[in-house]
Image (spheres, rainbow, N blue to C red):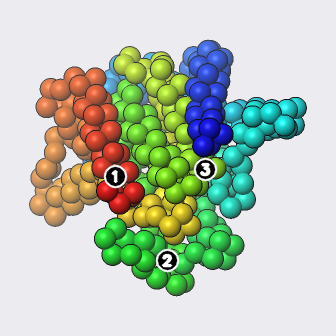
Amino acid sequence: MELTIVKVFLPTALAFAIGILITPTVTHYLYKYKMWKETPGKGRGYGGGGTPLFDKLHEQSDTNTPRLGGIVIWGSVLLTIFLIGLLEMWMPDSIFGKLNFLSRSQTWLPLFALAIGALVGFADDYLTVSGNGKHFAGGLPLSQRLVVVAVTALFSAWWFYEKLEISSVHLIGYGEVPLGFWFIPFFIIVALCVYTSSVIDGLDGLSGGVFMYIFAAYAGIALWQNQIDIAAFCATIVGGILAFLWFNIPPARFYMGETGIMALTLTLTIVAFMTDMLGEGEGVSILPIVGFLLVATVVANVLQVGSKKLFGRKIFLIAPLHHHFEALGWPSAKVTMRYWVLGFVFAIIGVLLSIGL
């Protein structure tokens, strides 16, 4: 038990420390090369029209706060894994030589998803701020990013289906639901839905806090299921997010950007399935509970667009939902803190349900 606790929590502390150490360098280059948008606002909203209210609320922060802050998150995770690998080589017989949580059966796949999301998201952020070329001036088109998510999910689903021999999911209060080959399209749909929640990255500290609680919850769920490597991996991500939040709380030094949010959403999908049948748990059906704020964000967007298309009127002042609260007059810090409170509550509820309490 002692080794298990060390294996889960020491990488968390390492990732946090590494994130704090690398941030000055990351910040230096983000500001040196002015990695922020040239013009504020969204330009075009979800319904295809302008976003004057949003543009007014964010006209200052959009043009002087860099994107690409997600480098701190995945950078600290990758450097932590590298450092632990070195410790294993140098001190194989000590407790520091037993911290490696990379394993084919548990963590190769989520690490792969993290890397894909980080790279593609980096490209999107860079193109967004550089404005090179008319076609990519606003970053990678959403359609192309969705293709990347779908292809990554397709490969991951195939890995589960063929390599890990998983073709069903557990449903809370019901039990196993066999899906057969339909497991693969179901996996892809879940991945796309989780990725659409990336629009929650819109206020200082908001998305970081929400995802911190989600990954902490899955670290606890995996630990309860004795999936120690997944628990350590999720806890390491939490450490990276905490380092990011140290500099992202209002006023933010930088924004997470697509490089962070895409990496986290892709990884979250894999982790949810890893803690399902593979861990004899309900990782997938717990996801809408642990990630309730992500669900609420997506549902609000769908309702907003649907209402505008069908009835010609808006339900919310602005979508996503957190901007609606801003438009009502809530300070952005109040919105963020209340999301953090709710994120913690839903994470606890999800963990309790997953362990059968």
User: In which quadrant of the rendered image does the C terminus lie?
Assistant: bottom left
Q: Nearer the viewer, residue 318 or 55?
A: 318
The type of residue carrying mark 1 is Leu
The outermost residue toward the front is 1
Disc 1 crowd rating (10 Å Cα; few below 14, some 14-19, many 20+) is some
Disc 2 crowd rating (10 Å Cα; few below 14, some 14-19, many 20+) is many
The residue carrying mark 2 is 168
Q: Nearer the viewer, mark 1 or mark 2?
A: 1
Q: Nearer the viewer, residue 355 or 113?
A: 355
Q: Nearer the viewer, residue 56 or 49?
A: 56
The type of residue carrying mark 3 is Ile
Distance from Cα at disc 2 to Cα at disc 3: 22 Å
Q: Nearer the viewer, mark 2 or mark 3?
A: 3
Task: Identify whether 181 is placed above or below 164.
Answer: below
The residue carrying mark 1 is 352
The residue carrying mark 3 is 228
Disc 3 crowd rating (10 Å Cα; few below 14, some 14-19, many 20+) is many
User: In which quadrant of the rendered image does the N terminus lie?
Assistant: top right
Residue at 61% x, 22% y is 17
Task: Identify whether 87 is placed above or below 26.
Answer: below
Classify mark 3: helix, strand or loop: helix
Classify mark 1: helix, strand or loop: helix
> Percent from the top left, x then y, of residue 35?
56, 25
**Residue 59 in sight from this viewpoint:** yes
